[in-house]
Image: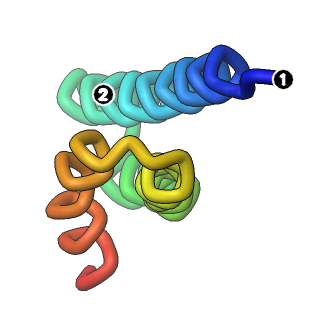
Amino acid sequence: MDLEPLLWIIFFLMNMGLIALNLYQIVSLSDLEADYLNPYESSSRINHVVIPEYLLHGAFSILFLLSGHWFFFLATLPAAYINLRK
């Protein structure tokens, strides 16, 4: 059984999760700009989604490495390294 289509579906769902997390951060920042939230609430909301975002990005890198997609792994490696250093 070829697992390639299943793997790409998993990548797609993970990517949609990352996009949703980024949109949540943008909405929080726009609420801060419009003065609906104070800076403490905004930073608290954004800080709650940073770790899941890092974990999803790390999972992307590991899955690309394990599945043998070397180009995609090398493309995600610099961002994963930067996230790891934070």
Q: Residues within 10 Å of mark 2 (few under 14, many from 20)?
A: few
Judge whether 33 appears above or below 41 on screen. above
Secondary structure under tag 1 reads: loop
Q: Which residue is mark 2?
A: 26
Q: Residue at x 28, y 41 (%)?
A: 72
76 and 28: which is toward the camera: 76
User: What is the three-letter code of the residue carrying label 1?
Assistant: Met
Q: Residues within 10 Å of mark 1 (few under 14, many from 20)?
A: few
Residue 48 visible, this orientation: no
Q: Percent position (x, y) of residue 82?
A: 19, 71
Q: Percent position (x, y) of residue 57?
A: 43, 51
Q: Percent position (x, y) of residue 69?
A: 38, 42
Q: Residue at x 19, y 29 (%)?
A: 33
Secondary structure under tag 2 reads: helix
Q: Residue at x 26, y 24 (%)?
A: 30
Judge whether 75 appears above or below 22 on screen. below
| View extreme (bottom): residue | 85
Q: Nearer the viewer, mark 2 or mark 1?
A: 1
Q: Which residue is mark 1?
A: 1
Judge whether 33 appears above or below 86 on screen. above
